[in-house]
């Protein structure tokens, strides 16, 4: 659980990943609000018991991807592990 404003979790995932594979993994988890911005894929995750929602950014680079899940509400300093769980779900699918 991270204490910051807003609460977030970030992980670097080694390996080459395509934008299409990332988008497919996001859909497989059940997240639908997906946008592309260059080499970055952004997904909005709706409100839940732990936060008012999260934004998941996946920045792709040659040989690795940076995954960052952050709470939408800028004043939320605790996420009760929700951002970490978002990334763990996505990583599990990407690693197949």
Image (cartoon, helix red, strand yellow):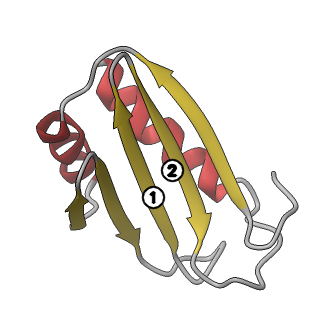
Q: Position of residue 78 (x, y in %)?
A: 81, 68
Task: Name which residue lies at 60% across and 63% down.
Answer: 70
Q: Position of residue 42 (x, y in %)?
A: 34, 61
- Say whether marks 1 and 2 touch (CB < 8 Å): yes
Q: Position of residue 74 (x, y in %)?
A: 70, 83
Q: Nearer the viewer, residue 89 or 8?
A: 8
**On the image, which quarter does residue 71 sit in?**
bottom right
Task: Name which residue lies at 52% across and 77% down.
Answer: 53
Looking at the image, residue 81 sits to the left or right of residue 40; the answer is: right
Pointer 2 residue: 86
Q: Nearer the viewer, residue 28 or 8?
A: 8
Instruction: State the CA–CA distance, disc 1 to disc 2.
Output: 8 Å
Relative vertical location of residue 73 with respect to residue 64 in this rendering, above or below: below
Question: Which labelled disc corresponds to residue 56?
Answer: 1
Looking at the image, residue 48 sits to the left or right of residue 5; the answer is: left
Task: Name which residue lies at 84% across and 65% down.
Answer: 4
Q: Earlier in the sequence, mark 1 or mark 2?
A: 1
Q: Secondary structure at mark 1?
A: strand
């Amino acid at each position: 659980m991270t204490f910051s404003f807003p609460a977030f979790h970030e992980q670097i995932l080694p390996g080459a990943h395509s934008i299409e594979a990332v988008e497919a993994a996001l859909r497989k988890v059940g997240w639908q609000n997906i946008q592309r911005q260059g080499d970055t894929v952004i997904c909005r995750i709706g409100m839940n018991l732990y936060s008012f929602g999260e934004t998941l950014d996946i920045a792709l680079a040659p040989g690795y991807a940076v995954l960052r899940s952050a709470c939408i509400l800028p004043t939320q300093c605790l996420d009760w592990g929700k951002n970490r769980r978002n990334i763990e779900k996505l990583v599990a699918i990407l690693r197949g």
